[in-house]
Amino acid sequence: MEVTIRNIGNSKGVVLPKLLLAQAGLSNADSADISIENNAIVLRKPKHLRDGWAQAAQSLAVQGEDALLMGEFGNADDEDLAW
């Protein structure tokens, strides 16, 4: 499929067909990851690296498994600080 590269201010842009976005799983996306691979521009669903972290932490807390691994420790000179 050929698309037109358009001027958008000082940049360039393309309009992506709805069917193409749907096939890539991006039809309802607000953003995408973009990269260059083998001289091609590649769009992907964005990675949400921290999705589920809050629920996982809450699950650990309920199970009593949320203790600090290293315990509390301060800096050597903390006792001399005036707050």
Image (tube, helix red, strand yellow):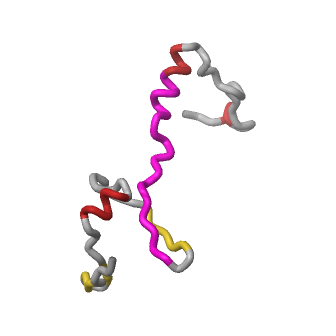
Task: Give the vertical position of 14 relative to 79 (above or below).
Answer: below
The residue range painted magenta reads 40-58
Q: Seen in the image, is 39 located left or right of residue 79?
A: left
Give the residue drawn at x 54%, y 72%: 37
Percent across and percent down for residue 78 are 67, 35
Task: Give the vertical position of 76 relative to 4 (above or below).
Answer: above
Between 55 and 26, the residue placed more toward the observer is 26
Between 32 and 17, the residue placed more toward the observer is 17
Give the residue drawn at x 56%, y 76%: 38
Farthest residue, direction front = 1
Count the marks: how many? 0
Give the residue drawn at x 69%, y 27%: 69
Task: Give the vertical position of 21 relative to 15 (above or below).
Answer: above
Farthest residue, direction top = 63
Instruction: Name the image quarter holding the C terminus.
Output: top right
Between 55 and 39, the residue placed more toward the observer is 39
Give the residue drawn at x 70%, y 37%: 75
Q: Seen in the image, is 20 located left or right of residue 79?
A: left
Tell me where residue 15 sits by quadrant.
bottom left
Q: Seen in the image, is 24 located left or right of residue 27?
A: right
Percent across and percent down for residue 79 are 68, 31
Question: Does the magenta run of residues contain 54?
Answer: yes
Question: Does the magenta run of residues contain 78?
Answer: no
Instruction: Name the image quarter holding the N terminus.
Output: bottom left
Tell me where residue 81 sits by quadrant.
top right
Q: Seen in the image, is 46 located left or right of residue 22?
A: right
Tell me where residue 44 sits by quadrant.
bottom left
Percent across and percent down for residue 9 are 25, 83
